[in-house]
Amino acid sequence: MLFTVLFPSRRTGALLVSAFALLSSPLAAQAIRTGTVAERYAQLCASCHGAELQGGQAPSMLDDVWVSGGDDESLARSIRNGFPEKGMPAWSAALPEKEIRAMVIFMLEKRAQARREQTQFVKPAESIAVQSELHAYKLDTWVGDLVEPWGLAFLPGNRALVTEKKGNLYLVENGRRAATPIKGVPEVDIDGQAGLFDVVPHPDHARNGWIYFAYSDPQKDADGKPVSLTRIIRGKLRDGALVDQETIFQGPLQYYRPDGGVHFGGRIAFDKKGYLYFTIGERGDGRNAQDLARPTGKVHRVFDDGRIPEDNPFAKRTGVDRTIWSYGHRNPQGLAFDPVSGNLFDAEHGPRGGDELNLVQPGRNYGWPIITYGMNYDGTAMVDITAKDGMEQPVTYWVPSLAVCGINFYTGDLFPKWKNQLFLASLAAEELRRIEIKDGKVLKQETLFKNLGRIRYVIGGPDGALYVLLPTRIARISPAG
């Protein structure tokens, strides 16, 4: 049985509904059959709002003009409660809450697509000046001939290290990549999303020489099947090789997952006191993120040598992973400390919709998979709620997903108006974003450029420039003129 429309009008406060829908109002008390949100939209809404939400008998939902509110909760409330006085029935009895949330995500995706199609994003060419909101900059290739660079670390003496996902580690000197990879790098699982991840020097590297790495560690389970999990090690460079290697963190073999797959995390950050923080994704099983016995779906904290601080939030509990700093994370691929406040932020992948920027605090639960602002990749609804007591809300979230990745706060002097602001790399969206944060709240976001390929990481260099890891190269952003 067909019926139509369930969304608020930006101009009149309610949508027009078809005569058939009004005559069939008892359907509001009946359950709607399951299926993808696109199928449900086509069945319930397209005849009035248009196949692409462009409007028809009812107004367009793409122009961001809303009388009853265009934010997530306002849209959900309009669907849920309707406007009976204006002819739109309440649909709360017909659509489960998680289906309403899925429809909101679908609408936001379509609105974002329409905005993208109407916006001319910057795609900077080599050495061409680009005017952003606060600074004019130019972008040049710093190091080329790379394959999926993942992490970048600057060392004294105009040197740097860059990791490639497929397991190579290269030394860069004076902007030139060595011809051959560094020897002695551990064997790395490179299937699926696995690989050689972050590289970070010790805060006192000039004195002690330690360099820290995150990678997917290949092992064999009790049945001899290949499995892997994110592992943290440190080592030193000597004569073109990684030597004096030590394991800082390795999870129990029982928690390793089949090799390859998804959601490894893999970011590392030091705080000002010298504690080491790192992320491990939940490896594709959201239940892992809520299980304190498992290292997966967590942010961890240890001393620089791997010892567990006694003031870790779960250090005195039995039956848990005592290195856990926070939990309920999905796949955190960005991790950075605010240089002013000292706050720790992580950027993590949501499902379809719901990428998050979180203020990471000790012992807190960030909700995955119990709460999320996303839905399943196939367009089916995931959860009923986006908030719950005892679970943290993100500082901000992105619907549609950007596929957020590496983050860093800019601390250089070449771009004074960017000082202490957060920069975020994204994979699917292919965007570099500048984010202004104050008192733990996002005040503004700007897309600096787009469509140069998947961006894995962004970091400030000792020269004050920004360095951005693109699919086959590292680009340097410096002031124009």
Image (spheres, rainbow, N blue to C red):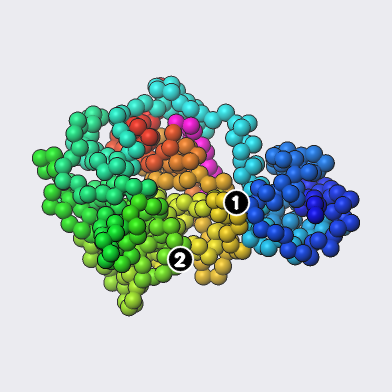
Numbered label tally? 2
Q: Residue at x 61, y 41 (%)?
A: 112
Label placed on residue 379: 1
Considering depth in this image, is 222 or 296 the residue closer to the camera? Answer: 222
Q: Which label number is shown at residue 287?
A: 2
Q: Nearer the viewer, residue 171 or 480?
A: 171
Is residue 333 part of the magenta span, yes or no? no
Magenta stretch mostly in which secondary structure? Answer: strand
| Quarter of the image where one finds residue 1 | bottom right
In the rendered image, which quarter contains the C terminus?
A: top left
* Residue 7 percent across, percent down from the top left: 76, 51
| Precedes in sequence: disc 1 or disc 2 | 2
Residue with the most extreme front position: 223
* Residue 53 appears in view: yes
- Residue 160: give its label: none
Secondary-structure class at tag 1: loop
Q: Position of residue 438 (x, y in %)?
A: 49, 51
Question: Is residue 126 placed above or below 381 in the rendered structure?
Answer: above
Camera sees residue 173: no
The magenta span reads 441-452
Above or below residue 194? Residue 99 is below
In the figure, is residue 467 to the left or right of 433?
left
Dot 2: element: helix
**In the image, 298: left or right of 176?**
right
Q: Residue at x 77, y 53 (%)?
A: 6
Residue count near mark 1 (Cα–Cα under 10 Å), binned few <14, some 14–19, many ≥20: many
Nearer to me, 198 or 192: 192
Q: Nearer the viewer, residue 255 or 154?
A: 255
The amino acid marked with disc number 2 is Arg
Expressed as whole percent of the image width and height from the top left, the position of residue 373 reads 57, 56
Q: Amino acid at mark 1?
A: Gly
